[in-house]
Image (cartoon, helix red, strand yellow):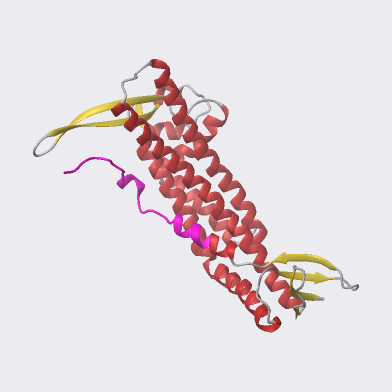
């Protein structure tokens, strides 16, 4: 027997289901859970990127206010920035690996959606130097060296119509010589980096990387949108059906399978909060046209 019921004491409501109805609702629950985990792992990536950008601003602010320029502090800063970059790259690698697993479980390994997800990754790799570079840098930092080899503290005079001001920035850089020294680093990427000089500012390339990370996930959202909306409707409809037919409020509704003795052998909770949570993450981590063309400033304009 298949049913909707509440797993709380004092509830007697039971809505019987056919096997077909049970299978459809069960598929919706499992699929939405897998796709929610993809969004949650993307959020780890974007939060790590936000921490990287925030760290740069925090360091620049401290350099503007304080006078401590000791060698140890500079090296601590370099290590800190490397930690932020490594967190970002590792979390995206986790996203890629685990998103593939989630998609395989929902759609199957040979499905068009899985193949398109792989093809999109290859397209971004071919088209974006930032994406290509940091995919390779992730392997480099995992096994051989740091992503950021050099940091520069800048204090530049900026002329305005009525006065001049000093702009403080911190620039994390890759030293091309360090990558060349690694015989395992991909030669084609080294060639792509040559026009950028020996000391390469990490920031614009990392912003390109993140723009493409968000674009990759948005492509997945677009391709699964119709199925996701159908599954959302299936779960919401099941909860509404329970409240309508049982006359009870939906406190802890579950999709249940019982054996011939009336014992519940499988139960899956039905609730809308995890659907709303996924929708909130989608809104939070919306794609950005180009992070390279954006920046944050605390400059006084008046």
Q: Position of residue 168 (x, y in %)?
A: 27, 31
Count of labels in the image = 0
| In the image, farthest residue toward the top | 71
Most frequent secondary structure within the magenta stretch: loop
| In the image, farthest residue toward the left | 162
Is residue 238 rendered to the left or right of residue 291?
A: right
**Residue at image location 47% in from the left, 21% down from the top:** 181
Residue 177 located within the stretch drawn in magenta: no
Is residue 172 rendered to the left or right of residue 13?
A: left
Residue 244, relative to residue 137: is it above or below? Answer: below
**Residue at image location 65% in from the left, 68% down from the top:** 28
Is residue 219 shown to the viewer in this render? no
Residue 62, relative to residue 1: is it above or below? Answer: above
Of residues 79 and 162, which is closer to you in this image? 162
Is residue 39 shown to the viewer in this render? yes
Residue 70, relative to residue 250: is it above or below? Answer: above
Is residue 116 rendered to the left or right of residue 151?
A: right
Assign the N terminus to one quadrant of the image.
Answer: bottom right
Q: Quadrant of residue 295?
A: top left
Is residue 19 rendered to the left or right of residue 147?
A: right
Q: Which residues are magenta?
A: 278-302
**Residue at image location 50% in from the left, 24% down from the top:** 182
Q: Position of residue 220 (x, y in %)?
A: 52, 59
Residue 35, relative to residue 144: is it above or below? Answer: below
């Amino acid at each position: 027997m298949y049913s909707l019921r509440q797993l709380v004491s004092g509830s007697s409501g039971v809505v019987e289901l056919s096997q077909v109805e049970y299978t459809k609702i069960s598929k919706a629950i499992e699929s939405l859970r897998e796709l929610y985990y993809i969004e949650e792992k993307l959020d780890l990536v974007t939060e790590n990127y936000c921490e990287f950008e925030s760290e740069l601003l925090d360091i620049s602010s401290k350099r503007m206010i304080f006078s401590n320029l000791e060698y140890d502090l500079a090296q601590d800063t370099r290590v800190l920035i490397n930690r932020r970059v490594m967190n970002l790259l590792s979390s995206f690698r986790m996203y890629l690996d685990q998103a593939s697993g989630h998609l395989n479980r929902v759609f199957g390994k040979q499905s068009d959606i899985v193949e398109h997800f792989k093809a999109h990754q290859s397209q971004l790799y071919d088209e974006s130097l930032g994406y290509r570079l940091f995919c390779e840098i992730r392997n480099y930092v995992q096994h051989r060296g740091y992503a950021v080899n050099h940091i520069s503290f800048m204090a530049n005079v900026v002329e305005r119509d009525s006065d001049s001001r000093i702009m403080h920035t911190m620039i994390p850089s890759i030293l091309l010589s360090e990558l060349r020294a690694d015989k395992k680093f991909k030669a084609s990427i080294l060639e792509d980096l040559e026009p950028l000089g020996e000391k390469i500012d990490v920031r614009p390339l990392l912003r390109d990387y993140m723009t493409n990370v968000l674009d990759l996930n948005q492509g997945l959202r677009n391709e699964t949108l119709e199925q996701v909306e159908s599954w959302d409707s299936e779960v919401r409809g099941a909860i509404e059906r329970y409240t309508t037919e049982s006359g009870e409020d939906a406190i802890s509704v579950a999709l249940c399978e019982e054996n011939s003795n009336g014992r519940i052998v499988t139960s899956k909770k039905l609730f809308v909060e995890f659907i709303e949570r996924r929708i909130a993450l989608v809104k939070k981590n919306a794609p950005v046209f180009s992070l390279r063309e954006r920046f944050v400033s605390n400059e006084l304009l008046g």
